Every structure is written in C-alpha cells, then in structure tokens.
Image (spheres, grey):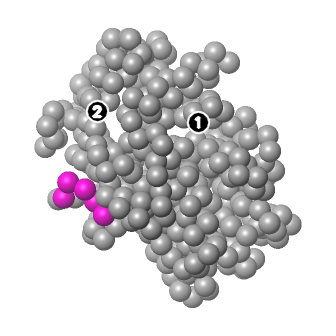
Amino acid sequence: MATLITGAAGYIGSHMALELLDRGQDVVVLDSLVTGFRSAVPAGAVFVHGDVGDRSLVGRVLREHKIDAVAHFAASTVVPESVSDPLGYYANNTLQTHALINETVKAGVPRFVFSSTAAVYGTTTSSQVDEKAPTSPESPYGWSKLMSEQILRDAAVAHGLSVAVLRYFNVAGADPQQRAGQSTPRATHLIKVCVQAALGMRDSVEVYGSDFPTPDGTGVRDYIHVSDLVNAHVLALDALGVNPGTMLLNCGYGRGFSVLEVVDAVKRISGSNFPVKMSPRRPGDLPAVVADATQLRSKMGWKPRFESLDTIVGHALAWEKIASAK
C-alpha cells in the first residue's frame, strides 16, 4: 500500500514525501509541474506527471499503486493573486479538488488529508484562533479552500471517507538536512524574500502595510517550520488509520511575529543589513493571524522540534545558499 501525494514537486508536498520515505513508506507523487520542480521530488518516490483534475489518470494511479491514503497539497496559494484571478483559483483549488475527491471515493481509498489554510478565518477578534472560530474568508484563496473543506465533510458523511483538514498558518524554513526547501525563485513568502535579500538575490524587501492595528503597525503571523508541519500530517494520517472519522486541526505554534520582527531576525542571523521599503497594504492581507493549536498538541501528541524563529530562519538561509549555488 502507498500514499499518494499531490503537489509533491512543490514546497510542502516535497517535505511530506521525504517524511514518509524516511519512515519506510511507499510514496507516489502526482504533480503537473506547472509551478513545481521535478528535482524537488525525492528519488525514492514514484513520480507521475499529471493533473489532479484528470479523473482518468487519477483513478488509474489510485488503483495501480494500491493507494490507501491521499495527502492533497496541489493548489494555488498567493492571496493577492487570487483577488485578481478568482476564477483561476476556484478552478484550480476547488474544482480540481472535487475531481480528486470523487476519484478517491470511487477507488475506495479510506483516508484523505487536506492542506487548508488559516485564510478561511478572515479577520479575527481574538489573539489566537481556534478551530471553532467563525469562518469568513476575505480572499478568493480562502474561499476556495473553505469550499473544498465542505466538499470533504459532505463526502465523509455520505461515503465514509476519513478526512483530516489541516489549516496552516505561515509555513517557513527548510528540511534540516537541506534535502528540500522553498524552491520557487520569486516566491512571496516573507522569510524567503528576506533571506534572498540578505544573500543579494533581491535589491530590497518590501513591507506591505505599516498601519495595521498591531504593536509596530506591520502584519503579525504565526510562522511554523515546514518539517513540524509535515510531521503533523503524518500524525493525522496515522490517527485516521486507527480511528476512522474526521478531524480539523490548526497548525501553528500559538505565537506570532510581526513583519519587522522577522526582517530584524533575518538581518541579525545573516549579518546583512539589506534595504527595506514600506508600501501600502495588499488586497486580502489581514492584520494578525495566530493559531490556537491546542487540539493538534493534545489529540495528536504533536511535539514540534523547530519552533524557534531563529531556527526557522537559519534553515531557510542555509537552503537558499545551497539552492543559489546550483
């Protein structure tokens, strides 16, 4: 039996593939390579080039490889881009996910882990957001993920599919062994942007919004190390195998850092005083989003290993040095 990972030529999916392979499990990767990189797929995984919306292909892969779990990461993820291209985001994130779920149910695959986002919550009034908080997305990206969550919930009730929905906060860092990292050259992730500026790969770092209702006026986010995040996915897969059903889990550390605090951390660790430019807010950006991940820690026994911001930045910096040298 094997796990199918969609989008494993991308950032988080490639780390998930490594995590499962390290555990001695069989992994099959399905990726269109539209935004991913073939080189990011670990050597021990079976690679299938294709789209998750290709029902014929997906059905064949699920049966031929005896897939008993799906981990779905393939998606478009840039909030401002979703505002300018909502139809593209609904097509890629919701309709494609519907097609994948449909084939998963038809093939009788029992477990499905879904990569969702804290963007489903929208603006919150509490300092930390738990899973019971109201969902009110403020971008098509957030809505596209929330719609997919609902499809999964309904499929779980109607067809007995066991589902884990993991809502990410801000994912950062790289594999501690430097086997994988954020490979997209012009990615919009703050820590990657800062690291690239520290290495001279960007002229400056642009900070979008200095008038948010936060201590220093810049957005506050809960940054979670990518390796801790994929460990949460593995724990969820294991839990569904023992206790079939549904679960919803926030993935974060429960504390936030502002944009300027992250910039200062990268400057300190890299020793580079790169330029910083202040710009207006971007559409869809929220003032502060910090996780209450009590459920993940208590129900899954999740014990993060890399929750220091300095560790996250250090791993990202080491990866970017390696990647830029290739």
**Residue drawn at 26 percent across, 28 percent down:** 260
Q: Would you say residue 120 is visible in this rendering?
A: no
Contact (Cβ within 8 Å) of mark 1 with mark 2: no
Q: Position of residue 322 (x, y in %)?
A: 61, 20
Tag shown at residue 175: 1
- Tag nearer the camera, 1 or 2: 1
Circle 1 Cα neighbour tier, 10 Å, few/some/many (<14 / 14–19 / ≥20): many
Q: Look at the image and say whether residue 123 sits in the magenta stretch.
A: no
- Which residue is the site of mark 2? 259
Q: Look at the image and say whether residue 129 sits in the magenta stretch.
A: yes
Sequence-first disc among 1 and 2: 1
- In-image side of 216 versus 206 (left or right): left
**Residue drawn at 33 percent across, 11 percent down:** 273
- In-image side of 206 versus 209 (left or right): right
Looking at the image, the residue that sits furthest to the right is 64
Q: Position of residue 112 (x, y in %)?
A: 61, 69
Quarter of the rendering occupied by the C terminus: top right
Looking at the image, the residue that sits furthest to the bottom is 158
Circle 2 Cα neighbour tier, 10 Å, few/some/many (<14 / 14–19 / ≥20): many
Residue type beneath disc 2 = Val
**13 is higher (above) or lower (below) than 321:** below
Main SS of residues in magenta: loop
Residue type beneath disc 1 = Asp
- In-image side of 265 versus 193 (left or right): left
User: Residues under labels 1 and 2: Cα distance?
Assistant: 23 Å
Number of marks in the image? 2
> Regarding mark 2 in the picture, which secondary structure is present there?
helix
Residue nearest the viewer, comparing 295 with 33 = 295
> Regarding mark 1 in the picture, which secondary structure is present there?
loop
Instruction: Give the magenta range.
Output: 126-130
**Residue drawn at 27 percent across, 29 percent down:** 261
Q: Would you say residue 63 is visible in this rendering?
A: yes
